[in-house]
Amino acid sequence: MESRPSPSAFNRHIRILICGAGKTGKSTVIQGFCTHIDESGGWRAFLFDDEEILIDVKEASNWRKNYASDYDGFLVIFSADDDYTFNYALEIIAEIQSCGIFPTILVECKNDLILEESTEQIEIDNEVRRRKLRMYSICGFDESHIVHPFAYLVEKLTRSENSESAKSRGDLGKITEVTEPNSRTSDMGSFVAKDKETCKIM
Ligand SMILES: Nc1nc2c(ncn2[C@@H]2O[C@H](COP(=O)(O)OP(=O)(O)OP(=O)(O)O)[C@@H](O)[C@H]2O)c(=O)[nH]1
Ligand SMILES: [Mg+2]
């Protein structure tokens, strides 16, 4: 197994926690998003606006207050076919908000299981709107869906520190994959960016 690179070799290190009830798709999302998986979660390297970024992703089923200092952003997940997990996700978001202001995104996973015009889905959409939450609806098996909530969190985290340059570069951030290890330090190879835009921020 390839060893995890040192965060100090990157311009920026972002730690994201996926939090949600059991069996909502947390591990599936980590496996879909991260290029490298280990026993505690996964990681992936990006070039984002010329910055080399290491993203670490871990999962948890219960919220703990110390997560507020252990992570930079939160992806709160529920399963489209299970009301209980939606209400639990709302409770987690309230807990996060009680600890301060953190980039947080609500993710409805398993959207392949949503029945057309289901009243449950209409109620979820109404509740999300009422609470002014940002929600992405995804299928955990579709990597093109999975990248969006992460891109949203990266954009939030990078903009909050550098709002001037964010304004000057407009609304679309560009995330380019870094696939090769980095050679600037002895423990990694060299950064080779694929000339490929994987995600646009909506
Ligand atoms: N239909 C459907 N099933 C999914 C989707 N994402 C994940 N699953 C399935 O849901 C089940 C639970 O997924 P996991 O990724 O293990 O969920 P988890 O939240 O990590 O579960 P715990 O770690 O046990 O809390 C597995 O059988 C997955 O294959 C999806 O988008 N659609
Ligand atoms: Mg899991």
Image: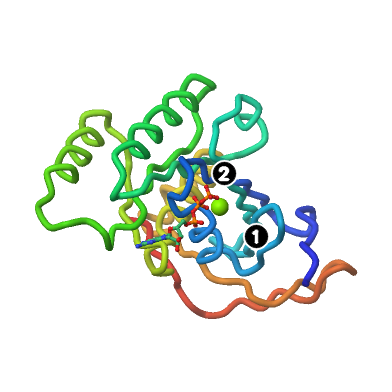
Q: Nearer the viewer, residue 76 or 179?
A: 76
Q: Amino acid at mark 1?
A: Trp
Q: What secondary structure is marked by label 1?
A: strand
Which quadrant would the C terminus be assigned to in this image?
bottom left
| Residue 192, label in figure | none
Q: Is 197 in front, or is 61?
A: 61
Is 137 on the left or on the right of 40, as rendered?
A: left
Q: Residues within 10 Å of mark 1 (few under 14, many from 20)?
A: many
Q: Indicate the colouring scheme.
A: rainbow
Q: Describe residue 152's horizontal placement relative to residue 50 as left or right.
A: left
Taking the image as four quarters, which one is ligand 1 found in? bottom left
**Quarter that holds the N terminus:** bottom right
Q: Position of residue 116 (x, y in %)?
A: 12, 57
Whole-number angstrom distance, CA of label 1 to CA of label 2:
12 Å
The number of numbered discs placed on residues in the rendered structure image is 2
- The residue positioned 60% from the left and 28% from the top of the image is 64
